[in-house]
Amino acid sequence: MLIRTLFALAFFTVVAETLLHGVHALAQSAVRRQSLLAARAEIGAATEAARAAAVQAIVRGGDPRGLNLAPLRTGGCRLLSGATCAIEGRATVTFTMPAPATPCPEAACTVYEQGNDHVDEGRLGASIVAQALGPEGAVLASRTQNVVFRTTRVSPYAALAGQSDATDIGSASPGDDAGAVPTGTAPGTLVDVIYRNAVTGAEIPANVWQAAAESRDGAAAWRP
């Protein structure tokens, strides 16, 4: 009888430990998932903050072909647990001027920026490092993303042209297909400038194209 009792106790102990480990693993998985979602949400918020900073700089008279912006930080609660912030998001944005990529064979990835004085199309890159933090400041997850904005002297002043997750691919530049010529049924992404006579309605093209290579430098997973 004693042996059976001890065996039963041992059996239930093993079962309880297995269940406890299973619950713990599920909890860890849930925290990990929420942390990654928080980091991605912070990247989204930081991307919009970076775009807004570029817009503000151009509206104030900045040159869209040579913006010099100071780093900025974003942050906020990404997951509430009652009245307590369970996961906080923080991000740092560092701006760069995207380096031109090596030209593709037969100019297969050539884009055309609008050089008309009323547009002055340019590019502005940014590296975003985002973290998801626990209640005591522990880093639960982190992501790094590179983005590139298409900048112009006219509205909308700055628009996202490409982005890539650089967490696992080093510092590869984001992709950028803004300024692509029409191909087949694809309409292209050029900025066209047309002057229209206010009296007669007659129109003439006023494009000043400036050829450049796409900013793709090794980005393995970019999306426009």
Image (spheres, rainbow, N blue to C red):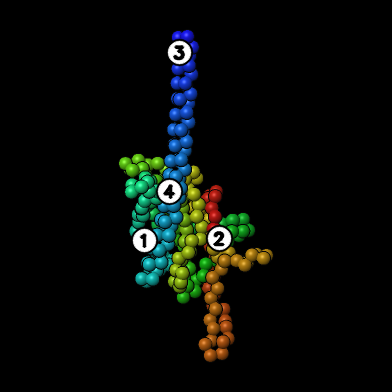
Q: Earlier in the sequence, mark 1 or mark 4?
A: 4
Q: Earlier in the sequence, mark 3 or mark 1?
A: 3
The numbered dot on residue 6 is: 3
Q: Tell me which corner region of the image, top left, top right, bottom left or bottom right, holds residue 52.
A: bottom left
Give the residue at x 47% y 58%.
148
Q: Amino acid at mark 4?
A: Ala
Q: Position of residue 160 (x, y in %)?
A: 48, 61
Q: State the residue position of label 1.
A: 69
Q: CA distance from mark 1 to mark 2?
A: 23 Å
Q: Position of residue 12 (x, y in %)?
A: 47, 21
Q: Amino acid at mark 3?
A: Leu
Q: CA distance from mark 3 to mark 4?
A: 48 Å
Q: Earlier in the sequence, mark 1 or mark 2?
A: 1
SS label for mark 3: helix
Task: Categorize mark 1 by other alpha carbons within 10 Å: few (<14), some (14-19), many (20+).
Answer: some
Q: CA distance from mark 3 to mark 1?
A: 71 Å
Q: Position of residue 90 (x, y in %)?
A: 37, 50
Instruction: Determine contact: label 4, label 2, CB under 8 Å.
Output: no
Looking at the rendering, in which quadrant would you find the C terminus? bottom right
Q: Nearer the viewer, mark 3 or mark 1?
A: 3
Q: State the residue position of label 2.
A: 177
Q: State the residue position of label 4.
A: 38
Q: Amino acid at mark 2?
A: Asp
Whether residue 162 can be seen here? yes
Q: Position of residue 4 (x, y in %)?
A: 49, 12
